[in-house]
Amino acid sequence: MGRLFGTDGVRGVANADLTAEMALGLSVAAAHVLAEAGTFEGHRPVAVVGRDPRASGEFLEAAVVAGLASAGVDVLRVGVLPTPAVAHLTGALDADLGVMLSASHNPMPDNGIKFFARGGHKLADELEDRIETTYRAHASGEPWDRPTGTGVGRVREYDEGFDTYVSHLVRALPNRLDGLKIVIDGAHGAAARVSPEAFARAGAEVVTIGTDPDGVNINDGYGSTHLARLQAAVVEHRADLGIAHDGDADRCLAVDATGREVDGDQILAVLALAMREAGELRKGTVVGTVMSNLGFKLAMRREGVDLVQTAVGDRYVLEEMKTRGYALGGEQSGHVIVLDHATTGDGTLTGLLLAARVAATGRTLADLAAVMERMPQVLINVPDVDKSRVASSADLAAAVAEAERELGETGRVLLRPSGTEPLVRVMVEAADIEQARSVAGRLADAVKSALG
């Protein structure tokens, strides 16, 4: 039986993989595990619970709230808010845990449960494992120790959460956005109200698309995984830039005034230089992943900014930042973490800081993003191979070495076994797209031959 918790909580098709019974059971288990760990000692425990607009979030939220309250935890329901809002409110309200119901950029039928520890930080892997073990034991019939009478949890709406979070975002800005016209694509998701409100309070003229969630349309043709509508809207409205979020708004991609995409690597480059100028880029370092574009690496080297690279996944970026004391990190996909203002990736905060840099410098987003040149990148998934032998195959090592000799200093090769599927990902970067395609194709063939 596989581990329930993945890299970003528990996810699956709502009411099939992720049921109301599971949501309730995991919540009760989380309460018991945290109580045993001493988190609740000396006070009555409190949890913050939020969700994205998916229809399934309504019954899953009810199950989570019921589970927590039945375990003696008081619950503050904050309603539809982004994942980073729940993390922020967990810390700001000194709550003992936070729970977010969302499947991020996944399609509407999916949903997920993510737990935050006190302070709004990701729950430690060891605690997730204990929650899962406890949940499985009780799902098979072991009885719970249940409080009664005044020991049960109380539930109330916390409508102030929206304003508390938006005010926090605006306070984080180094300067206002007056004079900028910005198109916001909310992905019909959790940021549909928050992001336009935050940008407007900061002084921007705001045009919105993808901000009418109905429980079904989340991520459907809008948001950071579907940029075409935002690109067209920016050009149509002659906006200075556009900002796109995913379903739970923990990521941000941007579009410049010409309609060209500005990805997470470019956003990181712009923010790294801005933070260094302000004396906020601790240790002169930014954290990326092994999938960061080579152009980003070359740009940071040229600008005198150190780059530390981790495994793929914002959890690994965050771990490195917290361990080493860095202030900025993120991924090409738009997960950007600014630890001075957030404990997790925050798409609205990222977009605001990017727009603030445009406003402060008087330069266009295209000009700022030109600090790095994106190298053409080709990714090929090679299925049905023995991914466990990627590092040990001599034939494959020889093929990679030959490819690296051909690419020289202006290219890069990365072979990565998938964490969830029986396939190997072949990534090649080169100065020329045709060369990247050619080398990637040959390496994909080598993977099939050596590992098939």
Image (spheres, rainbow, N blue to C red):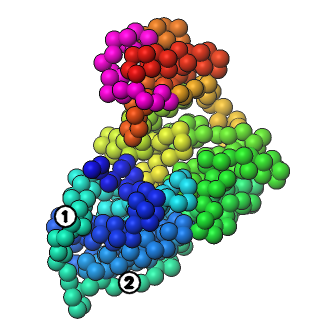
224 and 358: which is toward the camera: 224
In the picture of the structure, the residue carrying the numbered disc 2 is 155
Does the magenta run of residues contain 54? no
Q: How crowded is mark 2: few (under 14 residues within 10 Å), some or many (20 or more)?
A: some
Q: Which disc number belongs to residue 102?
A: none
Q: In this view, does 400 lie to the left or right of 40?
A: right
Q: In which quarter of the image is residue 10?
A: bottom left
Placement of the C terminus among the 4 image quadrants:
top left
Does the magenta run of residues contain 386? yes
Q: Which sits earlier in the primary sequence, circle 2 or circle 1?
A: 1
Query: Residue 384 at x, y = what percent?
Result: 42, 30
Amino acid on which the number 2 mark rests in the picture: Val
Query: Which residue is found at the position 49% from the left and 69% from the top?
Result: 57
Q: In this view, does 308 lie to the left or right of 256?
A: left
451 and 172: which is toward the camera: 451
Query: Which residue is found at the position 43% from the left and 62% from the top?
Result: 16
Query: Residue 291 at x, y = what percent?
Result: 48, 32
In the picture of the structure, the residue carrying the numbered disc 1 is 137
Q: How crowded is mark 1: few (under 14 residues within 10 Å), some or many (20 or more)?
A: few
Query: Residue 162 at x, y = what percent?
Result: 53, 72
Query: Which residue is found at the position 75% from the left and 42% from the top?
Result: 259
Q: Quadrant of residue 262?
A: top right
Instruction: Evaluate whether residue 135 shows in this view.
Output: yes
446 and 39: which is toward the camera: 446
Amino acid on which the number 1 mark rests in the picture: Ala
Instruction: Evaluate whether residue 281 shows in this view.
Output: no
Give how far apart the Cα atoms at labels 2 and 1 are. Answer: 27 Å
Mark 1 falls on what kind of element? helix
In this rendering, the answer to whether 188 lies above or below 413 is: below
Evaluate if marks 2 and 1 touch, with contact meaning CB atoms under 8 Å apart.
no
**Highlighted magenta segment, given as a residue range:** 381-400
For marks 2 and 1, give the one nearer the viewer: 1
